[in-house]
Amino acid sequence: MKIALIGSHGVGKTTLCFELAARLKRRGLDVEIVREIARGCPLPINQETTREAQEWILHSQIAAEIEAAARHEVVLCDRAVIDNYCYLVQAAGGSPEWEAMLDRWLPTYDLLVHVPVWTPPAYDGVRAVEPGFQQQIELLLEGILTARDIGVLRLAPGDHDRWGRQILEAMLPTLEPTLPLFSAEELDL
């Protein structure tokens, strides 16, 4: 099973990934996190990014997901190709080649979870802190999701304390056997 948390930068995707990984590991599942690839990019990111930088990120994202899925039962992605593609569109415009790759790659996710903008980005040493840039990426993502009619689990901005529980509830039909062996309380929902 592969789940990707998508959204603009600075909204809590990384923290949520670690929270989910801990909950799933407590259930005895083999979990791997594909960390945010942009942090390792040798080229400029954020507002200074280039087509080459974003293509490096997209290729690296796909490679990391393939590797993780080959070795682990559950893969949690801190981003997906779709939100990484938004940074390419913002920097250099759309790309027919990458649009075709999105068509091929999006079905590999079992669940896309949209983490909304609910707070301005905080300085973390890597990501941009300009709220306007954060909002631009969010609008691009919303436009692509709408244009492609992509189904996602949408988390509510004011309900971030329940986000982990909502994602686990969405995953349960895939994770538990036909006859549940444990109650929701025992599953740490």
Image (cartoon, rainbow, N blue to C red):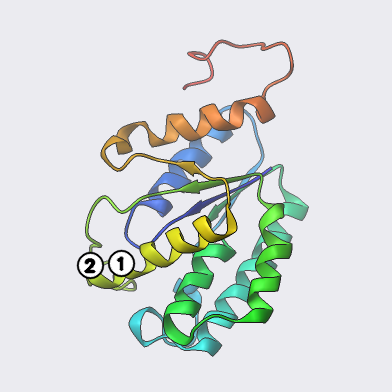
Q: Residue at x 37, y 62 (%)?
A: 138
What is the C-alpha distance between the residues marked 1 and 2?
5 Å
**Kind of residue sitting beneath label 1:** Gln
**In the image: residue 132, left or right of residue 60:** left
Up-down: is 174 above or below 68?
Answer: above
Q: Let me know if residue 29 appears in the view.
A: yes
For the question of whether residue 79 can be seen, the reply is no
Residue found at the far right of this picture: 70
- Provide the secondary structure element on which disc 2 rests: helix
Farthest residue to the front: give it: 147
Q: Residue at x 56, y 10 (%)?
A: 183
Q: Quadrant of the N terminus?
A: top right
Along the viewing direction, whichever of 97 and 23 lies nearer the viewer = 97
Task: Determine whether 18 is above or below 125 in the image.
Answer: above
The residue labelled by disc 2 is 131
Task: Please provide percent x and percent y for residue 162.
Answer: 36, 31
Q: Is residue 59 left or right of residue 139?
A: right
In this figure, which residue is indicated by the disc labeled 1? 134
Residue 144: x and y in percent read 51, 63
